[in-house]
Amino acid sequence: MPSDLTLRHASARLAEWAEMVPVLAGRALMRFGPPALGILLFLAAWQSAHWHYGAFILPSPVQTFLAVWATLSSVSGWAALGATFGRVGLALGLSGMIGGGLGLLAGYLWLIRATVAPVATILLGMPATAWVILTMIWFGPSHGSILFTITIVIGPILYIGTVDAVLTRDRRLEDMATSFGASSLMRFRTIALRQVLSSLGPVFGIALALGFKVAIMAELVTNVAGLGAQMARARAHMDIDMALANVALAVAGLVVIEHLVIRPFQTRLGAWKRGAA
């Protein structure tokens, strides 16, 4: 049987937990309460619009959820989802290497920055719709044309974001490392590059969201396999449930990738800032 000392220790721990429960509950409410309230308000507005306009114009959230479930229950649904996600991920990687790499050089070298600046402005000002049409004419309706379209649209965003991150980095940290004998390569790898990458988190989030929009629009126009092609078929059959289901899948995928990949990566890179504070 447990001793009196063990019982008193267990009672003390239970008392501590009892005191912490309201504090933890309050923190959880402050953290998750407002987002949950926002989602509930959005669903309530959606349901109200469904009652007002009818199911033919706007299906209810429940109908859309059932359509999403039907899509995820089929092999073709997962194939379309994987095709869109794969294109966006590959295009984001290519844009990061090309736009981000060129942005690093431009941030350090004035001549490259001054030379590329007008080109980046022109590319950034080109409408995504124009690129979809042009690439379809140049390359035809293919996987490569969609990949090129996404890359050319989000590449300038990553370039400009990288240049700004390089120019606004804290140079005093590099000067301090120089005084301790750190080489140029070590200063760049351990200090400058970390500052640049930690500043690019929001830029990557914007590029990811724009990449999904461009991918779906390009797939819709070219009718190449993906969520956009699924929406094109839903439009042809006047299936508003399936059209909204594909939109919901794209949004859900964007949210999942941002919270599971981009934000943890940004948090890890920004840990040195919190340690230095």
Image (cartoon, rainbow, N blue to C red):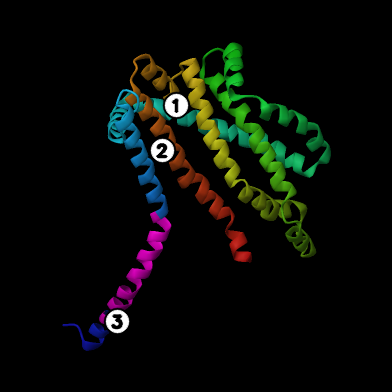
Task: Give, as a three-letter code, the residue at label 3.
Answer: Ala
Residue 187 visible somewhere in the drawing: yes
Q: CA distance from mark 2 to mark 1?
A: 15 Å
Residue 207 as seen in the image, left or right of residue 232? right
- The residue that disc 1 covers is 83
Q: Which residues are magenta?
A: 11-33
Q: Residue 87 colored magenta? A: no
The C terminus - image quarter: bottom right
* Within-10-Å neighbours for mark 2: few <14, some 14–19, many 20+: few
- Disc 2 is placed on an element classified as helix
Mark 1 or mark 3, earlier in chain = 3
- The residue that disc 2 covers is 252
Q: CA distance from mark 1 to mark 3?
A: 56 Å
- The residue that disc 3 covers is 12
**Dominant SS in magenta:** helix
In percent of the image, x 46 and y 28: which residue is there? 84
Residue 68 visible somewhere in the drawing: no
Task: Tell me: residue 87, above or below residue 107.
Answer: above
Q: CA distance from mark 3 to mark 2?
A: 44 Å
Q: Residue 22 colored magenta? A: yes
